[in-house]
Image (cartoon, grey):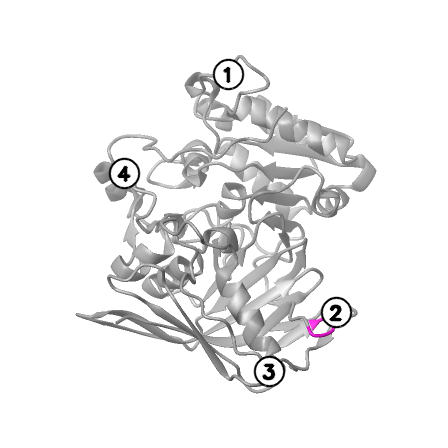
Amino acid sequence: MRAPSPLTRRTLLAGTTALALALTATPATAGAPPSPRRGSLVLIGGGLKDDNTQVYGEIIKRAGAADARIGILTASSLPASQDPEAADPDKCSNSACNGAYYANLFKKHGAADAQWIPIDLDHIANADSDQVVAQINSMTGFFFGGGDQYRYVTTLLHGPAHTDSKALATIRAKLAAGAVISGSSAGAQIASGPDMVTGGDSYRALRDGSTPGYFDDPTRLGYLPQGGFGLLRSGLIDTHTGTSGREGRALRLAADTGHDRVYALEENTAVVVDNPGTDHEALRVLGPQGLAILDLDHARTDSTAKGWSLTGARYTYLTDGDHYDARRRTARPAPGKTPLIPRSTQPVPANNDVFHSVDNPDANPYSLRATARQLAETRTQHTATATTFETCPRFTVSLTKNPGPTSWTSIPGSAQSIIGLGIAIKGP
């Protein structure tokens, strides 16, 4: 079976206006997770490849290794009733066939068992079924597939009250007892606490700001004030970051909503979170790309008639094996990585599309990361600038080296992990 295809955005319930109004209610205790927790999270930024034994193996190991039993949730996919190819196992892309796809993958990677949990837009009542709860209780780990995170809200949480279904309450209890909860793309996004992003691109986010709600326009920066399941609350979560140039939208949303950190996940790469929601919360990166941490603890913003600007934020990019202490806001390198001594005398190349615009036919993914690494490698520049592809208005991003090491590496001369570059965004 092929991997699930990307899903187009669509309104899930009634009109967008009515939905946006419903989303703004924020009960103080909605979705509050138990504490402390013994379990862990494995969150992937999307694009998880079938042969990523490193990430699948980590999930399975944390679920009990050879005894692992993985519950697959794919309610973020279209239900079979809305999939015109539902009857074709080679073309279908609905919750049931995607659930079977992931169940087979986990078994191939060594899980003792993997089962689809039959909750989706066709089976919302199953989220409060005692039979489904019994199935969930028999699992030792869980995987949430990609699609549209708002479908998880619709199926596993109860309406404007945003209270847990029996199924979600049971999954929370399993996490507290030591289970692993994993997810990719929307399945990682739904772990968010308040102000979960629902869509938007970086340029329009910088130009227009954010709006609470869920919108058919994929370029409009929307967010859900109540958030997702609240499994990881020490920062906002974004996914597909480098491939879709989402750093700009992540910074704008965090600034607009008063958050001081974003975990910006990359494709085919996981962040493993131990002790989530406690003072001992610790993160580790696993995979071929990385985790961008956007720190706004000392950031300032300004809005004028000419546009929006941000100063005082920091950009850190961690790669395979690196660790991050969420409480102390400190990172340490993977074994074998050492501080990079910059030796290049080449200037940082011009970058006229820092957020990988969909309107640029020559756009390159991981554009901001590329400029950050080039700055870390050179000893002749303290600051590098890059601009948006769009020009009405054009935004300029500045990256600045701070005292101390700016990069770790295990390859001489190559910047892999980036440590605490200053990042600022300025309008015209």
Q: Main secondary structure of the magenta part?
A: loop
Q: Which residue is mark 3?
A: 345
Q: Which residue is mark 4?
A: 19
Answer with the quarter of the image where residue 96 lies: top right
Q: Which residue is mark 1?
A: 86
Q: Which residue is mark 2?
A: 410
Could you tell me which residue is drawn at 44 percent across and 31 percent down? 155
In front: label 1 or label 3:
3
If you read the primary sequence from the N terminus, does the residue marked by circle 1 or circle 4 appear first? 4
Which region is colored magenta? 409-413
Are the residues tagged 4 and 3 within 8 Å (C-beta)?
no
If you read the primary sequence from the N terminus, does the residue marked by circle 1 or circle 2 appear first? 1
Q: Secondary structure at mark 3?
A: loop
If you read the primary sequence from the N terminus, does the residue marked by circle 1 or circle 3 appear first? 1
Quadrant of the frame with the C terminus: bottom left
Q: Is residue 256 above or below residue 130?
A: below
**CA separation in Å, label 1 and label 4:** 28 Å
**CA separation in Å, label 4 and label 3:** 54 Å
Q: Amino acid at mark 3?
A: Thr
If you read the primary sequence from the N terminus, does the residue marked by circle 2 or circle 3 appear first? 3
Q: Is residue 201 above or below residue 402?
A: above
